[in-house]
Amino acid sequence: VNMLCNDAVWLLDEALKQLEEVRTEQKAINSDQFARLPAYVRHRREAQFVQLQRTTRSQMNLAYASIQMIGFMSQGHRQPFLSKELVNRVAEMINYYINKLNGPQVTSLKFKDPKKFGFRPKALLRELIRIFLNFAQDSVFLNAVASDARSYDPQVFKKAADNLERCEIVSDAEHRKFHVVLERLETLAQKMKREEEALGEVPSKYLDPLMATIMYDPVMLPQSKVVVDRAVIKRHLLNSTTDPFNRSVLHMEDLVEMPEL
């Protein structure tokens, strides 16, 4: 599941970067300045643009396939995605792309003939919303979504809900379910904010040094002697069996319990 999420994020990020490049190049090719360039320069740029179209379409198809695989797995195998090690990563991933397709950044993805480049924003948003709704059955996922300060924006999610209805992207039942979940999320986010304000400033010794979040299960790394949250280091170890502070070899069984902390 971790590898699948890594692939999906990398593929979709690369595809969206290429789409932004497409937008920039389209504007350049359609400009008066481009028309004044020598013929051989125009022909070279146009050939490069055709190649960009091919690579972008291929990248988008691979990205869609990865997102669809996550959607398929989320229908009946939610628990691996919602484990302590991965739930925040999954929530942040879905939040980010819903924000990307509905927030202020969406203007960078508007260009002529998107289908030629394999870009189907409605289909992508539909898949993301259905994955979101599958995971939203579990409170642990909603907690992760609401605590994502970088990408969770109630206003953007409301705009997403409006887009779903206006463009008929999902069924009426899915749209109603999304609205209900958004109301739960807003209530949850407000509650978290009140709790954070009541808690005040947390001493640094209780914060994970990698994520700056409160450690609920602190463990010490044997070589660097740094104390981290178990879920955070487990997520790191899924990608690299090293101590992130000194690159020494590290395995799960090496972690030192810190019950007193």
Image: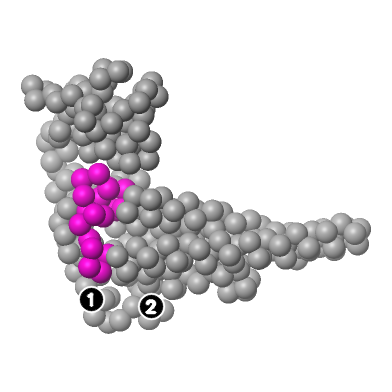
Mark 2 lies on residue: 169
For image coordinates 66% across by 65% down, the residue present is: 53
Q: Position of residue 250 (x, y in %)?
A: 31, 28
Q: Is any part of residue 160 visible from this angle?
A: no
> Does residue 176 appear left or right of residue 10 in this picture?
left
For image coordinates 58% across by 74% down, the residue present is: 115
Number of numbered callouts drawn: 2
| Numbered tag placed on residue 254 in the rendering | none
Measure the C-alpha gap from mark 1 to mark 2. 13 Å
Q: Residues within 10 Å of mark 2 (few under 14, many from 20)?
A: many
The quarter of the rendered structure image containing the C terminus is top left
For image coordinates 44% across by 53% down, the residue present is: 7
Q: Dividing the picture into quarters, in which one does residue 44 lie?
A: bottom right
Q: Say whether residue 75 is magenta.
A: yes
Q: Position of residue 13 (x, y in %)?
A: 49, 53
- Of the residues shown, which amino acid type is indicated by label 2? Ile
Q: Position of residue 152 (x, y in %)?
A: 31, 52
Which stretch did the figure color magenta?
A: 74-92
- Above or below, comparing residue 121 to residue 95 in the picture: below
- Above or below, comparing residue 119 to residue 84 in the picture: below
Mark 1 lies on residue: 176
